Amino acid sequence: MATVFTKIIEGEIPSYKILEDENFIAFLDINPNAKGHTLCVPKEEVDKLFDLGEHMYLQLMQFSRRVAKALEKAVECKRIGMSVVGLEVPHVHVHLIPINEMKDMTFQHKITMTEEEFTDLAATIKQYLQG
Ligand code: AMP
């Protein structure tokens, strides 16, 4: 069965999209640890990060870096934290999280955002993408 992220990639369910190219997509996490929490996902439906081919793995890091640079400019934070978990959705994804303190990386503290806030934030982040 297709993962929820494949459904997003195929446009079957909506997302707050930040960036998409031939092989990857980035969108806002729907249950964010912090404002700007973004997921970078390869379109290829692979469960575990280190099962990606080496080329795809390196490309995912390159794609994630581009998104992280935009996030850092768009959202006030000390830095961008990066995490790969995958216990909930078995489809590789890099969590990029604008962080100010360690608890922002724990996935135990969540923030709530309105639909309008998600939409506005995605638009703001997009403005800072380069290249
Ligand atoms: P994990 O698989 O443990 O790395 O976590 C999966 C992440 O995907 C969680 O942070 C969820 O909030 C996020 N997530 C699940 N469904 C969606 C969705 N439809 N849109 C955006 N984010 C999602």
Image (cartoon, grey):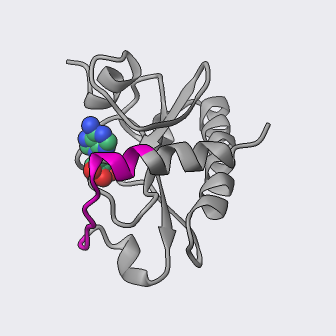
The residue positioned 35% from the left and 17% from the top of the image is 11
Please state, as top left, top right, bottom left or bottom right, where the N terminus lies in the image. Answer: top left
The residue positioned 34% from the left and 65% from the top of the image is 33
Q: Position of residue 23 (x, y in %)?
A: 58, 23
The residue positioned 69% from the left and 49% from the top of the image is 128
Q: Is residue 44 above or below residue 41?
A: above
> In the figure, residue 10 lies in which quadrant?
top left
Q: Which residue lies furthest to the right in this view?
A: 131
Q: Position of residue 7 (x, y in %)?
A: 30, 21
In this view of the protein, can residue 93 be seen by the observer? Answer: no
Q: Where is residue 95 in the image (x, y as percent from the top left)?
A: 45, 53
Please state which of residues 37 and 46 is positioned toward the viewer in this rendering.
37
In the rendered structure, does residue 72 fall within the stretch colored magenta? no
Q: In this view, does 80 lie above or below 65?
A: below
Q: Which segment is the magenta one?
A: 108-119
* Left or right of 55, for residue 122: left
Q: In this view, does 114 lie above or below 18?
A: below
Q: Where is residue 61 in the image (x, y as percent from the top left)?
A: 63, 45
In the rendered structure, does residue 109 fall within the stretch colored magenta? yes
> In the figure, residue 131 lies in which quadrant?
top right
> In the figure, residue 27 lies in which quadrant?
top left
Please state which of residues 123 and 80 is positioned toward the viewer in this rendering.
123
